[in-house]
Image: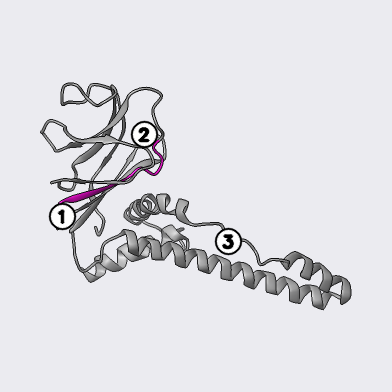
Amino acid sequence: MADDTEKDLDAGERALGTMPREDETLDEARERRAWEMRLAPLSELLPPIPPPDGLLERIQTRIAAEDGEQELVRVRRKLVGWRTATAAFALAAAVLLVFVALPIVSEPQSRYVAVATAEGGGPALIVEFDLADGIATVRPVGLKAPATGDFELWHIETGEAPRSLGLLTPGQPSQRPLAASPGDVIAVSLEPVGGSPSGQPTGPVVYSGNLVAVDE
């Protein structure tokens, strides 16, 4: 278990860019891409970090006041240090977000996540399911309101008919009861206003994704 945990953490570091990825095996590349899918929605939460106020003016003033290449070298070194610190703060924020969003490793297979996407598109919906309380947290991260009709959320177990989890409102997170297992499909269909009239999907399935254990 310790080796699996270390491999998973290494894959996360490669996804963040703090470890090289040139010599990855096929399995390591697959694990890194899984982390990239987890981290992609979180990048939208990181605010840009502007340079300190007046930094450019101070640099220009010092270069003009103190002629010589040595001063320019010192200023450039300070700029490199500032950029490195900025990158470190951004990385720390990303890691913090990961630990907030993902489960504690000591509780294996207790929570699951599905990232619902359109074919060839980015994530539109994140569904996090906590096995302990049977509650799914639904976060529309890229869902746009349809021109007509309503989006309806579905849970599809292998070999079973789809079960409605209710309508979705773009931009509004929600919680719904759910009993699910890894491999189950979370899907979103476009339905008439008010939802499917038959209790089954009647419109096109616009987004879908599989539930996976986040600590695997």
Mark yes or no: residue 19 visible.
no
- How far apart in space, not on screen, are marks 2 and 1 (Cα)? 26 Å
**Which residue does the numbered mark 1 point to in the structure image?**
131
Identify the residue position indicated by label 2 in the image.
118
Q: Position of residue 153 (x, y in %)?
A: 25, 35
Q: Please identify the quarter of the rendering in which residue 103 is found.
A: bottom left
- In this rendered view, identify the residue nearer to me: 118 or 32: 118
At x 40%, y 54%, the residue is 39
Which type of secondary structure does the marked residue at label 2 adopt? loop
Residue at 78% x, 69% y is 59
Q: Earlier in the sequence, mark 2 or mark 1?
A: 2
Q: Position of residue 27 (x, y in %)?
A: 31, 54
- For the N terminus, the image quarter is bottom left
The disc label shown at residue 49, or none:
3
- Give the mark nearer the N terminus: 1 vs 3: 3
SS of the residue at dot 1? loop
Three-letter amino acid code of the residue under disc 2: Ala
Mark 1 and mark 3: span between their CA atoms?
A: 37 Å
Quarter occupied by residue 202 = top left
Circle 2 Cα neighbour tier, 10 Å, few/some/many (<14 / 14–19 / ≥20): some
